[in-house]
Image (cartoon, rainbow, N blue to C red):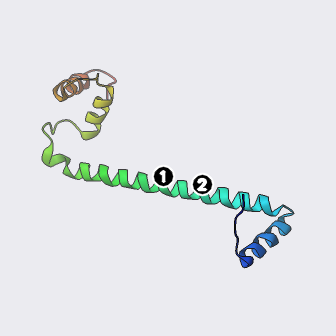
Amino acid sequence: MNVYIADDLLERVDAEAHALDRSRSSVVQEALAEYVTSRAETARREAVTRAIDVAEGIADDWPSRDAHPEIFASEYLIGLRAADEGDADADVVLRIVSERGRPGSG
């Protein structure tokens, strides 16, 4: 693979490689790996931030749209996760309400 690197940057890479008693190639590989990892981490952080923003928007809007204010949003989401495929919302709510009376159910 051939890559053009500006002379001033190449001099800095060579100086770093010499200071670390490593090859130019190993310094460039490490730098490239760190760059790619950093970009991936930044993208992941941005995706998490967007997800949090969406969740906060849902939480802010939840009280005005909540058909069952006696059920906390977190309870309902946990109930959905535990629900069988095809369970209606009403089934999930009934299960949550019935399980509240059981010992150790929170």
Q: Position of residue 58 (x, y in %)?
A: 25, 49
Structural distance between the alpha carbons of marks 1 and 2: 10 Å
First-in-chain label (1 vs 2): 2
Pointer 1: what residue?
44
Instruction: Please indicate whether residue 49 sits to the left or right of residue 17 in the image.
Output: left
- The correct choice, above or below, for 4 with respect to 77 in the image is below
Tag 2: amino acid: Thr
Q: Residue at x 78, y 60 (%)?
A: 25
Q: How packed is label 1: few (under 14 Cα within 10 Å), some, or many (20 or more)?
A: few
Which residue in the structure is indicated by mark 2? Answer: 37
Q: Residue at x 37, y 54 (%)?
A: 50
Q: Pinpoint residue 100: horizontal percent, then vertical percent.
A: 25, 26
> Residue at image x 22%, y 27%?
92
Q: Regarding mark 1 in the picture, which secondary structure is present there?
A: helix
Instruction: Give the SS element for disc 2.
Output: helix
Left or right: 39, with 85 as reference point: right
Q: Amino acid at mark 1?
A: Arg
The answer to whether residue 97 is above or below residue 14 is above
The residue positioned 28% from the left and 23% from the top of the image is: 85
